[in-house]
Image (tube, grey):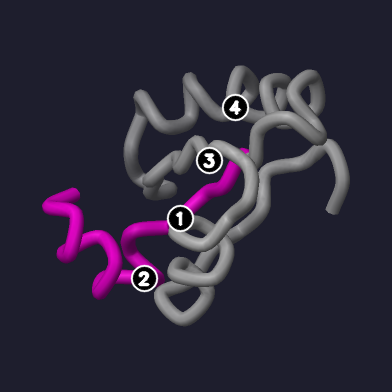
């Protein structure tokens, strides 16, 4: 969705992040993580402001343990 962070999964990480034509910011987060909740509005704002020049993505580490483990998150 334009202007919003893109939700990434274990199966979409390679195509959406590693093979992206744009630079990518990946926010690894969890619902139980207080700092993640504090940062969420800033990540959303960045996605909106940088649309077209930066791809902003979010990975829920609880739902996507494979990619979280691969990056030692």
Under circle 4, the secondary element is helix
Q: Residue at x 83, y 37 (%)?
A: 3
Q: Which of the 4 image quarters holds residue 14?
A: bottom left
Disc assigned to residue 64: 2
Q: Nearer the viewer, mark 1 or mark 3?
A: 3
Circle on res. 59: 1
The residues colored magenta run 56-73
Sequence-first tag of 1 and 3? 3
| Classed neighbour count for the residue bearing mark 3: other residues with Cα under 10 Å, few (<14), some (14–19), many (≥20) | some
For marks 3 and 4, give the CA distance: 12 Å
Q: CA distance from mark 4 to mark 1?
A: 12 Å
Q: CA distance from mark 1 to mark 3?
A: 12 Å
Q: Nearer the viewer, mark 3 or mark 4?
A: 3
SS under mark 2: loop
- Kindly report the distance in space between the C-alpha atoms of the residues bearing marks 2 and 3: 18 Å
Contact (CB < 8 A) between labels 1 and 3? no
**CA–CA distance in space, label 2 to label 1:** 7 Å
Q: Dot 1, how many residues are within 10 Å of its Cα: few (below 14), some (14-19), or many (20+)? A: many
Q: Earlier in the sequence, mark 2 or mark 3?
A: 3
Quadrant of residue 54 within the rendered picture: top right
- Toward the right, the furthest residue is 2
**Magenta residue check for 67:** yes
Could you say which is closer to the camera, residue 14 or residue 62?
A: 14
Q: Where 72 sits versus 25, above or below?
A: below
Give percent across and percent down for residue 31.
43, 48
Residue under the point 17% across and 64% down: 70
58 to the left or right of 29:
right
Question: Where's residue 7, x and y in %?
Answer: 61, 58
Residue 51 in percent (x, y) is at: 80, 32
Rendered location of residue 29, percent (x, y)? 40, 45
């Amino acid at each position: 969705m334009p202007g919003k962070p893109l939700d990434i999964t274990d199966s979409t990480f390679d195509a959406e992040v590693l093979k992206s034509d744009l630079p990518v910011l990946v926010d690894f987060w969890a619902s139980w993580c207080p700092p993640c909740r504090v940062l969420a509005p800033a990540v959303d704002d960045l996605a909106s402001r940088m649309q077209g020049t930066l791809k902003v993505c979010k990975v829920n580490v609880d739902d996507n343990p494979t990619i979280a483990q691969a990056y030692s998150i």
